Amino acid sequence: MSVHASHAWSWYEPAQGATRTVRWPARLTTANSPSRTAKGLWWDGLDPQDLYAQNHAPGNQKDWEWWEWNAAKGCSIPDPAYVQKFFLRTQQLWDDYRPDMIYFDDTVLPLHGMTDEIGLKLAAHFTIPASNGMAGTKPW
């Protein structure tokens, strides 16, 4: 299983600058659109902010600087609600599907550079059966 959500906060920031004058405006602005603009579209009734979380000021990082979660280099830092949602969704993916392997788009742990707490909690959940409701079973 592959999880890319830890960096969705910054990866989708360019969508905040999309306008209705560009080609395929509905596709480019979905990440920053309120759910009320979905009437009649495929995502009617869903809130893009639940997935893309783009109601924040974008960072001004350049090149690969967004990878480090370094505010001093211009990266916008996810708020606590986004971090908690990332943790809970990732934990639920593990619990629901029990993959043999899980991959993150991170060099160390998810959200490393901002916090290691989330990555360590996920690692414990994945490897310690008692922490994920699977006491008495092997995690692999």
Image (cartoon, rainbow, N blue to C red):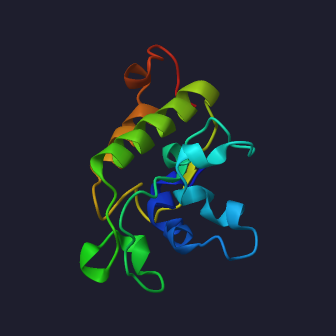
List the single residue furthest toward the left. Answer: 72
Residue at 43% across, 35% down: 88
Q: Is residue 96 above or below residue 71?
A: above
Left or right placement of residue 17 versus residue 74 in this view? right
Relative depth, front residue between 68 and 21: 21
Screen quadrant of the C terminus: top right
Q: Would residue 44 be seen by someone viewing this image from the given angle?
A: yes
Residue at 65% across, 66% down: 28
Q: What is the x, y in percent for residue 20?
A: 65, 70
Left or right placement of residue 98 versus residue 40 in this view? left
Left or right placement of residue 49 versus residue 58 in this view? right
Q: Is residue 24 above or below residue 52?
A: below
Q: Quadrant of residue 67?
A: bottom left
Q: Quadrant of residue 40?
A: top right
Q: Would residue 1 be seen by someone viewing this image from the given angle?
A: no
Q: What is the x, y in percent for residue 61?
A: 39, 81
Residue at 33% across, 44% down: 81
